Amino acid sequence: MTAATDPVKLMKQQVGKAAADLVKSGSIVGLGTGSTTAYAIQYIGERLKSGELKDIVGVPTSFQAEVLAKEYGIPLTTLDAINHIDIAIDGADEVDPQKNLIKGGGAAHTREKVVDYLADQFIVVVDAGKLVDRLGSVFAVPVEVIPMAVTPVMRAVTQLGGKPELRMGVKKAGPVITDQGNMVIDVKFDSIDDPVNLEKTLNNIPGVLENGIFVNCADLVLIGEVKDGQPVVREM
Ligand SMILES: O=C(CO)[C@H](O)[C@H](O)COP(=O)(O)O
């Protein structure tokens, strides 16, 4: 991965590095998905290679995370082989003041939710553009659905007041297919007043595997910003 030059990439790079610096030797590390987490994976790999970090094992949240971890020399494991995760680092699409999140911009929220909730410490890495006063202000809620249930789930989320859209591939004809072989419906709500209940309600629709609302999960949110032309990282 080359050094970032544009401001958003620079923020992502700095915040990814800050999170990677929090990983301690001997840790089992949840490896999130997305362009910000990719920098964290890169820096964990660099710390391992330099000998500063030892005995790390990663749990990838997606095929992308797995490929990057292999590229940067991070040994991997699966949830069958371990009984806990020490720290997970992952990005987000929206973060509210209570540290609730919308995730799933990379269609990886199902595995991310498993890994991030299992971690003793879950660190969220975002650029400042992801901060919102209320979840759903900008981003739609990604909902992973088994293929045969797409139409009834779309009907059900419309009845809940959402505007559903089947996520389509880029440079691929047809819908996005998740790492589990399912599809993603992005559901835009005018306002999400009660994320705790909406998360449960969406997951109760038959055919829904998991949705991208993460509540009471994040321990630390690291925010990348550019101040006076310089990238800085602050805690929420
Ligand atoms: O939830 C995710 C993938 O499913 C990502 O973490 C989220 O979309 C943020 O990605 P990025 O760091 O590229 O902005």
Image (cartoon, helix red, strand yellow):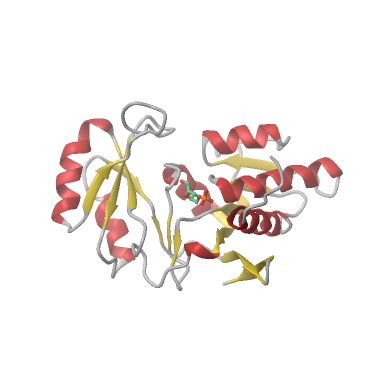
x and y percentages locating residue 143 in the rendered image: 32, 46
Residue 87's place in the image compared with 57, above or below, is below
Q: Quadrant of the N terminus?
A: top right
Residue extending furthest right?
51
Residue depicted at x 61% and y 71%: 235
Task: Pick whichever, 222 or 209, lies toward us.
Answer: 222
Residue 212's place in the image compared with 197, above or below, is above
x and y percentages locating residue 6 in the rendered image: 62, 53
Task: Pick whichever, 214 or 86, lies toward us.
Answer: 214
Residue 160's place in the image compared with 151, above or below, is below
x and y percentages locating residue 16 in the rendered image: 65, 54
Say whether residue 156 is left or right of residue 70. left
Say whether residue 127 is left or right of residue 176. right
Does residue 137 appear in the picture of this structure?
Answer: yes
Does residue 78 appear in the picture of this structure?
Answer: no
Residue 172's place in the image compared with 124, above or below, is above
Say whether residue 211 is left or right of residue 160. right
Q: How many labels does the image show?
A: 0
Residue depicted at x 51% and y 38%: 62
Say whether residue 139 is left or right of residue 151. right
Q: In which quarter of the image is residue 224?
A: bottom right
x and y percentages locating residue 29 in the rendered image: 64, 48
Residue depicted at x 74% and y 42%: 45
Task: Pick whichever, 73 or 14, lies toward us.
Answer: 14
